[in-house]
Image (cartoon, rainbow, N blue to C red):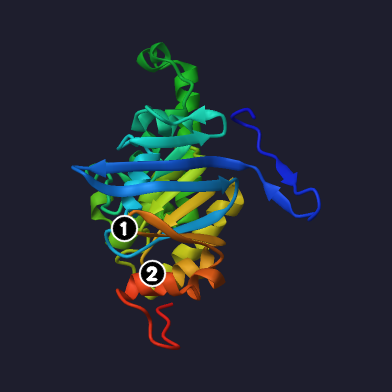
Amino acid sequence: MTADSIHSTTQPDSGIVQLAPLLRVSDIGISFGGLKAVQQFSLSLPQSVLYGLIGPNGAGKTTVFNLLTGVYQPDSGKMNLSDISLIGRKPHQITAAGIARTFQNIRLFPSLSVLDNVRLAGQLRSSEGLLHTLLRTSLHHQSEAELKQRAMELLEIFELQHRAHELAGNLSYGHQRRLEIVRALATSPRVLLLDEPAAGLNPQEKRSLAQSIREIRDRFQVAILLIEHDMGLVMDICERIVVLDHGVTICEGTPDVIQNDPQVIAAYLGAAPDSGQNIF
């Protein structure tokens, strides 16, 4: 399968159409000083899906994101984006391959404008050479205009276009969260990893965020993997969910399956649940 080919397959007797995986992760693991942070983690992420990755604090969720984006290198296992192996690649190479992420702790350039934060990310896909930039040729001006137009279109999705020329550091916390997603989208990813995008948002902002995430998936046909502690948001928008506990996958399935799995409930409560008790 080529880097750009995504196709579906049909099980012989079931008639069920299954999307071929865009991102395939097989049995990756990593240890820190003898502590197994993630063990034999596997994931198959098709194109244009919205999946969730949840688990109690310290379960290994952000470590998985760091492995997928080259911040950490796995001790074992395989990771492929279509036919591209991600093992041994650095973060900027993985971003260029088509995986972008946001962070639990916001990492914008606060002294740059909202627009410039997005344009800088978009330059990753620019085909303009250094000579055209230095000489400020017509190609340079055309490229800059296209970058600005795309940045403004992305900002409009999150209703930030009217804040384009303000400093990013002057935005409210909620708007900075939204800007970080816009900046990730500016790299034209095929896979978007969102690390607790609803953290610190009020209920109205969360509802707006959920709508925007769905719109991103539908408009850009991007696969989204979401880490989030807000179970209401996860159960509302995710089609499939993987649950980690102490670095081990304990359950994977639809929201209905996850909500009713005793092992998942016990992991969150720290003990076997009482009859009828449900954390979701």
> Is the residue 272 above or below the residue 218 in the image?
below
Q: Residues within 10 Å of mark 1 (few under 14, many from 20)?
A: some
Residue 210 x/y as whole percent: 48, 64
- If the image is split into quadrants, where does the C terminus sit? bottom left
Query: Mark 1 and mark 2: span between their CA atoms?
Result: 19 Å
- Which residue is the extreme one toward the bottom? 275
**Which residue does the numbered mark 1 point to in the structure image?**
246
Residue 7 x/y as whole percent: 70, 40
Q: Nearer the viewer, residue 55 or 141?
A: 55
**Which residue does the numbered mark 2 point to in the structure image?**
230
Secondary structure beneath label 2: loop
Residue at left 50%, top 69%?
A: 258
Q: Tell me the quarter of the picture where residue 250 sits.
A: bottom left
Q: Relative to residue 267, is residue 11 drawn left or right?
A: right
Residue at left 30%, top 44%?
A: 113
Q: Relative to residue 4, is residue 11 drawn left or right?
A: right
Q: Relative to residue 155, is residue 239 drawn left or right?
A: right
Q: Amino acid at mark 1?
A: His
- If the image is split into quadrants, where does the N terminus sit? top right
Residue 11 x/y as whole percent: 75, 49
Residue at left 42%, top 37%?
A: 77
